[in-house]
Amino acid sequence: MAYEIPVTQARAELADLINRVVYGGERVVVTRHGKPLVALVSAVDLERLEELSEPAEDHVDHVVSSVSTVRETAAVRPERGRFGIAAERRGTTGA
């Protein structure tokens, strides 16, 4: 949860707010008349936000690529069912 502070108070305490964000891992929301105006977040949080806001097409391409890889792997080495393995074992050890 973010720490909220009025803009007038934030001006006077900017250095302390920056320290809270950088060293305390807090997020600070600066308000005007009780409404959110801006937020102070760490550079790491900003990078995460930017990654999340990548165009949806990039995410779709990544998913399609992953699914294609899974299909190729499955086609190369098909898995045998539990009963197929048991039947093979009986066939090779039986008289």
Image (cartoon, rainbow, N blue to C red):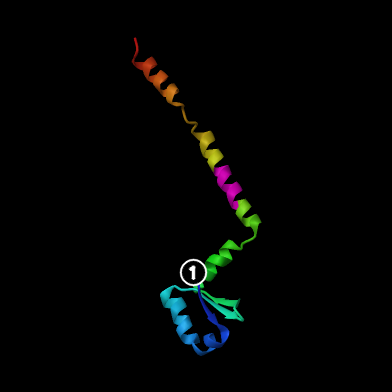
Q: Residue furthest front?
A: 34
SS assignment for the magenta stretch, majority: helix
At 63% across and 51% down in the image, what residue appears? 60
What's drawn in magenta, residue-wise? 62-69
Q: In the figure, is residue 13 to the left or right of 62?
A: left
At 53% across and 65% down in the image, what residue appears? 48
Q: List x then y, in percent, for residue 9.
A: 53, 87
At 37% across and 20% down in the image, what residue appears? 89
Q: In the figure, is residue 92 to the left or right of 5?
A: left
38 falls in the magenta region: no
Q: Is residue 37 above or below residue 84?
A: below
Q: List x then y, in percent, for residue 7.
A: 57, 84
- Is disc 1 placed on a helix, strand or loop? loop
Q: Is residue 15 above or below residue 91?
A: below
67 falls in the magenta region: yes
Q: List x then y, in percent, for residue 49.
A: 56, 66
Which is nearer the eye, 87 or 69? 87
The C terminus lies in quadrant: top left
Q: Residue furthest bottom?
A: 12
Give the residue number, with chain letter if any, for mark 1: 1
How would you rate the neighbour count of disc 1 (Cα within 10 Å): few for under 14, some for 14-19, many for 20 or more? few
Number of marks in the rendered image: 1
Which is nearer the eye, 53 or 61? 53
Q: In the figure, is residue 58 to the left or right of 48?
A: right
Q: Amino acid at mark 1?
A: Met
Q: In the figure, is residue 84 to the left or right of 61?
A: left
At 41% across and 77% down in the image, what residue appears? 23
Q: Is residue 76 above or below residue 82?
A: below
Q: List x then y, in percent, for residue 15.
A: 47, 86
Q: Residue furthest top?
A: 95
